[in-house]
Structure formats: C-alpha cells, structure tokens
Amino acid sequence: MTDAHNHQSPPRFLIWGQGGWVAGHLETLLQHQGKDVHSTAVRMEDQAEVRKVLDEIKPTHVINCAGKTGRPNVDWCEDHKLDTIRANVIGTLILADECEKRGVHITVMATGCIYASKYNNDRTQVASPPFTETDTANFDGSFYSYTKSCVEDVLKNYPNTLILRLRMPVSDDLHGRNFVTKITRYAKVVNVPNSNSILHDLMPVVVALAEHNEVGVVNFTNPGAISHNEVLALYKQIIDPSYTWQNFTLEEQAKVIKADRSNCELDASKLMGLVKRYQAEGVEVEVPEIHEAYRRCFERMKEGMQMREGAQA
Ligand SMILES: NC(=O)c1ccc[n+]([C@@H]2O[C@H](COP(=O)([O-])OP(=O)(O)OC[C@H]3O[C@@H](n4cnc5c(N)ncnc54)[C@H](OP(=O)(O)O)[C@@H]3O)[C@@H](O)[C@H]2O)c1
C-alpha cells in the first residue's frame, strides 16, 4: 500500500450515506474522537450534486457507507435491479471518480459476501482456505453480491480508493440491522461458520486506515469464523437465558428466500498486519479473534441494558 495523498491540514471527513446504519456508527465515533466530520445523503448517481457537495465541503477523506442493501433484506435487490445498479455500481463509481479528480481519499464499504467457502458434510467446519483479497469472487447467487463484486473489480484500479470488505456486521445493541438481531428473530436459522465484523472493534480501524491513506482491498472482519449456533449459544448465555432457537438446513432455507446467501471465511491477516503496525505507532485499535470479540460484544450489550434498566428504575 502507498500513501495516496499528503494533506497538510487535519483531515476533514465526509460520510456518504447519512441516515444509514454503518454511517451512523462512523459519524458518532468520529464526533467522539473530536474529528472534523460532515455527512451527506446526496444520491451518488447524481453527478452534478456529488460535485457540488465535494466542492462545498472540501473533504480530505470521503467514507462511502451508501448503497442499496435491501429492506427487509437483500431479496429486495432481486426485484429492484436498476435501483441497485444505480446506487451500488454507477453511483459508487461516480463518487470514487469525482474524489480521484480532486485528490480526495475515499474508503468504500464493500462486502465479503462475494465468496462461498467449502464446508464439511454437516457444515460445522470450513473445509477450504479462507479467501484472501486477491482471490477471484466465486459467489454471485444474489444480485446484491453481484453488483458489489463487479464494482470492486473496477474500483480497485483507482489509486485513491480503499475497499473494506465487511461481513455480517454486529453492533453492541439489538438494532434491526445487527446480524445477531436478524438471526434471533428468524423462526429457523441455518448453522454455518462465517466471518463476521464486530463494529465496535472495526470502526476505529476505518478511521486509522483512512488517516494513513491506505488503498486497495482489505478483508474487514475479525479473524476466524463462527457458526450461527455458537453466536446464539453465547447470546443465550450472556443476554437472554430464556432464548431458544431451531435450526434448518441450507436446502430448507433456500425454499424461503429469493436470493442465495453467501457463507464464507475471509483471511483477515492483511488487516491484522495493519492493526499491529498502528498499535506500534500508539493508535488505539484492537481486533480480537471472532469468538472473543463476540463475548466482549455481548458483555458490552449486557452492560448497556443494565445501565438503561438502572436509569429507568
Ligand atoms: N449491513 C450489512 O449487513 C452489510 C454487510 C456488508 C457490507 N455492507 C455495506 O456497508 C454499507 C452500509 O450498509 P448499512 O448496513 O449501513 O446500510 P443501510 O443502513 O441501508 O444504509 C445505506 C444508506 O445508503 C443510502 N443510499 C442508498 N442508495 C443511495 C444512493 N444511490 N446514493 C446515496 N445514498 C444511498 C440509503 O438511503 P436510502 O435508504 O434513502 O436509499 C441509506 O441511508 C453498504 O454499502 C453495504 O453494502 C453492509
């Protein structure tokens, strides 16, 4: 990786996708860190408006958290292909291109859901090596994943662009977008080990990577893979002892969803190398192995719940 820019003044962040879930997490963090942070909900495919916002705010760093993810889930993208293309492909490229023309660094929230790992027969273990940043995408079972992998292929040629591959992001609350909230609300859940992104650990790394003007693709998950049942057992142990769940197979799941879902493990060693380097510089970042990260996440969640209960009493 190389330094794309050498800005003299303190960084000015502009978050794209104002109102979105990940955008909100980043904005709060940057505000807590006392950074110069702005955000916008301008449509990325509206090139004139994109230019206007960039020229008015004059960011040194754009963080693109905008995109069509689908509501209630990615099945939406199957029925709204043009909206999905306009946001996830055309808009994403326009924004990166306008940033490049102005010498602005851009971080793009991408997805690791462009791969499918091989599993053992009962799908309790990953049976193929974790995917690295240079592996060719091998999952296009959903239109959402297809658009994200197409755009990544083009974006990686931009010298000002950092591409962070999130997967199944998890927050410290039970927000509807949190992977844990989603799977605890399903009537039945599959049980397959996957790479997950714990936002508490990873959001500070977004800031560090951007401030170091890193570019290229980075798998952006905690190291290791964790199964749905391991997550739910920890949830039951720490958050809700009365919680129970039922499993079903991937074949049974396929009958109730429109688009296929990616299950995979990503290789987080490139990310961990960067984290180690920043730690040596005194930057406060830590990305624990996924099982430990989940335990800490549920403990913070429990603490938050107890504090709120205490405040209401
Ligand atoms: N959450 C996940 O499971 C997950 C996993 C991996 C990667 N990611 C990636 O992380 C990013 C953020 O995800 P999120 O969970 O925060 O999604 P989110 O809550 O749906 O937020 C996305 C935001 O982008 C906005 N947006 C959509 N199309 C736009 C366009 N053409 N121009 C400008 N803004 C647009 C949306 O506004 P409107 O609703 O008004 O359109 C929304 O405010 C996405 O790129 C997503 O692909 C998410």
Image (spheres, helix red, strand yellow):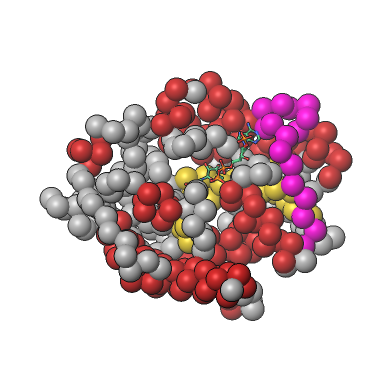
Q: In this orientation, which residue lies closer to the viewer: 288 or 295?
A: 295
The boundaries of the magenta stretch are 35-50
Is residue 218 visible to the viewer in this orientation of the structure?
no
Q: Which residue is pictured at 68% across the width and 59% down the height?
A: 28
Specify the quadrant of the image occupied by residue 234.
bottom left
Give the residue displayed 83% in from the left and 46% down from the top: 58
Q: Quadrant of the N terminus?
A: bottom right
**One can see residue 179 in this view:** yes
Q: Is residue 40 magenta?
A: yes
What residue occupies the far front of the structure in this picture?
313
* Left or right: where 186 falls relative to 94: left
Question: Residue at image x 43%, y 53%?
Answer: 181
Looking at the image, residue 259 sits to the left or right of residue 106; the answer is left
Task: Looking at the picture, tell me which residue is in the foreground, 243 or 272.
Answer: 243
Where is residue 100 shown, x and y percent of the image?
71, 40
Please indicate whether residue 119 sits to the left or right of residue 62 in the image.
Answer: left
Above-or-below relation of 280 to 190: below
Query: Does residue 28 sit above or below 189 in this rendering?
Result: below
Q: Nearer the viewer, residue 134 or 279?
A: 279
Q: Going by the image, does 79 lie left or right of 105? A: left
In the foreground, 235 or 262: 235
- Split into quadrants, the picture shows ligand 1 in the one at top right
Tell whether position 3 is magenta: no
**Residue 271 location (% of width, % of height):** 49, 62
The residue depicted at 38 percent of the width and 49 percent of the height is: 185
Where residue 87 appears, x then y in whole percent?
A: 59, 30
Which quarter of the image is occupied by the C terminus? bottom right
Q: Outermost residue toward the left?
A: 121
